[in-house]
Amino acid sequence: MGGYADRSDGVRNVLDPLEVHVVTFADEGHRFALVVADLICVNVDVVDRIRAAMRDVGVQSCWVAATHTHASPEAGCSPGGDATPRHVADRLEAASLVAARSAVASERAARLGSARTLVPQLAGHRNVADPAPLDIPVDTIVVTAGTEVVGLVVVSPVHPTILPADNNHVSADLNGGIRRALATPDRWVVVATGAAGDISTRHTRQGRGLDEADRLGAWLADRVEPVSPRVGEGAAPPVRPPVVRTVTLAPKQPAELDVAVRQTPPPGGGNERIHRVMQQGLRIAAEQAARQRTEPYVIDVEAVDLDGVTVVAVPGELFLELGETIRAAAPDQARDVVVLGYANGYLGYLPARDTQPCYETYASPVTSGSSEIVVEAAVAAVAAAVGNRDHSRRINA
């Protein structure tokens, strides 16, 4: 199983089935598909496979995102990315195609809107011993046919890590709990994960089982339930291909590891567990340093404008504050910006430059300041995506 550095067991059973969801957005000229899979990550190799296969079902552009559940099979979730195990890639591609065919067959005229809800007591900064209370910004893309809400794409910037490291049963974890709480017979629900790099339920959860995933899922659902979604006025803009910005990032240098080791605080009386996690991060950093990588990492940051809702895809674990920076720095015409993490590849952690030493800064494969470069690319992609708008065609979802 994937997700935890010290995990060695394989999959033994199923708590709740892992799911693959596909939502298609189309007009007369273009069809875009969003695939969301209950996996720890998706790497570029399987994303490329799915994109190629999607052309046979009439999908011209496609994103593939993982929920980052830590109760999934290992999928190549290593800093910098890795090859996807063949059996995982085969099953993900097959499930994505089945879901895509169903989505295309059931398309209907629809409009999109988005809503943001600040949810208290859901999650917080995970590697802080005594974090201040934090209201978590949860974004919901609302799909409306007439006055009826027919679908929701919920983006939760929270690590789905309620189930512990010694769990060996697959599960969608928190994202599954949110889905179950929000779904109705007349409304489909997809739950993706956003800029969750430093956010988890570590300090808010009251248990480590599926019942706790359902409790927190219901807690969130009670607050994000859409009542009167705001949708675009006039004709919908056309569906256009995502805008891609390619970013080159330098690998972390051995000197950065030396500095990190000197800055590691000694274990204190109340944060022994956090210290233990930090030691895991240092071990991962040392392994990366030993490989002496000099080749830069090259990733794509993408943005797509869907009926006035601009969605950003980042192939890694962006910190929450950086996701918020993308929203704040976006141009005024991008009134609704939603940031997806773990999408179209897996680079690893993308902490802010001024983040204090922690597991995420140690395990990140890229040099300090790389995350800010990713943010700049995302803002540029958003600006280009909203610049492509016109008001001539209808959207189906």
Image: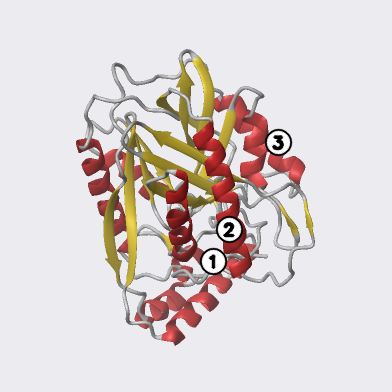
Mark 2 and mark 1: span between their CA atoms? 7 Å
Which mark is nearer the camera, 2 or 3? Answer: 2
Q: Is residue 140 above or below residue 258?
A: above
Taking 4 as reference, is 208 above or below it?
above
Height in image: 112 above or below 24?
above
Query: Where residue 78 appears, x then y in whole percent?
Result: 52, 70
The three-letter amino acid code for the residue at tag 3 is: Arg
The percent coordinates of residue 18 (x first, y second) are 67, 49
The picture places residue 158, in percent across and down from the top left corner, at 54, 46
Secondary structure category for the residue under label 3 = helix
Looking at the image, residue 247 sits to the left or right of residue 97; the answer is: left
Q: Residues within 10 Å of mark 3 (few under 14, many from 20)?
A: some
> Which residue carries the number 1 mark?
77
Q: Residue furthest right?
A: 13
Considering depth in this image, is 382 or 332 the residue closer to the camera? 382
Say whether marks 1 and 3 touch (CB < 8 Å).
no
Mark 1: which amino acid?
Cys
Amino acid type for the residue under numbered disc 2: Ile
Residue named by callout 3? 215
The residues tagged by marks 1 and 3 sit, at their Cα atoms, a distance apart of: 28 Å
- Using the image as rendered, state which of residue 51 and residue 231 is in the foreground: 51
Any part of residue 39 in sight? no
At horizontal 61% and vertical 70% (from top left) the residue drawn is 5
Q: Nearer the viewer, residue 302 or 50?
A: 50
Residue under pointer 2: 40
Q: Residue furthest top?
A: 147
> Which dot marks residue 177?
none
